[in-house]
Image (cartoon, helix red, strand yellow):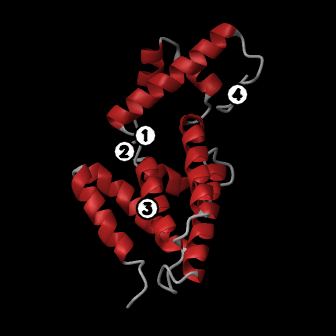
């Protein structure tokens, strides 16, 4: 029986161990080779058959969703905290940096997330929309406070976040951070 990436409460001990090993190895393999890495390699490194991987995670996106679930929740929670910040513009910038780093956890993750944005059947769809809703709230608050350009919107923010995540795959961390700062400066209100 496929669990679609969510472990049942009463999973047998051996199945739970396989599930946890698969997640640990998927994290390591995706960090090394990106989100398009071989699922067979993940199963092999976890010491299970590929059928066991598919029993727990019927698709690559189900595996990614399980890996990212806690991290997604943490990024959304950080956004909630930032909504209470005094400076709405600074809060938006801080969250954009958090979201960009999160989206760059694995090479190719940004592209995987973008590909699922309009696919309600994808296991990543819900996570994408939670992040989008948080970004929209932060953008709206910043716009109302005059902390960003009046023509900037959440789509602009997520394009910048995706670009920043892609840049982290291409250049040094230092250069990626500098380029993200330049991009975020583009959201500032014109003076």
Q: Going from the N terminus, do you reach mark 1 or mark 4 first?
A: 4
**Residue 167's x, y, as percent?**
30, 57
**Residue 7's x, y, as percent?**
69, 25
Q: Name, please, the residue furthest toward the right.
A: 10
Q: Is residue 83 visible?
A: yes
Where is mark 2, residue-wise? 107
**Residue 6's x, y, as percent?**
68, 31
Q: Going from the N terminus, do you reach mark 3 or mark 2 first?
A: 2
Q: Going from the N terminus, do you reach mark 1 or mark 3 first?
A: 1
SS at badge 3: helix
User: Circle 2: is it few (<14), some (14-19), or many (20+) Cα within 10 Å?
Assistant: many
Residue depicted at x 59% and y 13%: 17
Residue depicted at x 54% and y 77%: 153
Give the CA distance from mark 1 to mark 4: 20 Å
User: Circle 3: is it few (<14), some (14-19), or many (20+) Cα within 10 Å?
Assistant: many
Quadrant occupied by the N terminus: top right
SS at badge 2: loop
Give the CA distance from mark 2 to mark 1: 6 Å
Q: Going from the N terminus, do you reach mark 2 or mark 1 first?
A: 1
Residues at badges 1 and 4 in contact (C-beta under 8 Å)?
no
Where is mark 3, residue-wise? 161
Where is mark 1, residue-wise? 35
Where is mark 4, residue-wise? 3
- The residue mark sitting in front, 3 or 4, is 3
Give the CA distance from mark 3 to mark 4: 31 Å
Instruction: Answer with left or right where residue 29 lies relative to residue 51.
Output: left
Give the CA distance from mark 1 to mark 3: 18 Å
Nearer to the camera, 117 or 85: 85
Residue depicted at x 46% and y 68%: 90
- The residue mark sitting in front, 3 or 2, is 3
Residues at badges 2 and 1 in contact (C-beta under 8 Å)?
yes
């Amino acid at each position: 029986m496929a669990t679609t990436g969510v472990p049942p409460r009463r999973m047998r001990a051996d199945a739970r161990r396989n599930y946890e090993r698969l997640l640990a190895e998927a994290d390591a393999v995706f960090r090394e080779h990106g989100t398009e890495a071989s699922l067979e390699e993940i199963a092999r490194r976890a010491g299970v058959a590929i059928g066991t991987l598919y029993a727990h995670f019927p698709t690559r996106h189900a595996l990614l969703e399980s890996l990212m679930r806690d991290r997604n929740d943490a990024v959304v929670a950080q956004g909630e905290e930032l909504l209470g910040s005094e400076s709405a513009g600074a809060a938006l910038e801080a969250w954009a940096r958090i979201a960009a780093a999160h989206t760059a956890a694995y090479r190719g993750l940004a592209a995987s997330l973008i590909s699922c944005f309009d696919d309600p059947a994808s296991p990543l769809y819900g996570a994408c929309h939670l992040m989008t809703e948080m970004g929209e709230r932060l953008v709206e608050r910043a716009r109302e406070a005059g902390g960003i350009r009046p023509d900037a919107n959440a789509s602009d923010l997520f394009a910048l976040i995706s670009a920043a995540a892609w840049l982290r795959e291409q250049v040094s961390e230092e250069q990626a951070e500098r380029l993200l700062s330049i991009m975020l400066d583009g959201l500032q209100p014109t003076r």
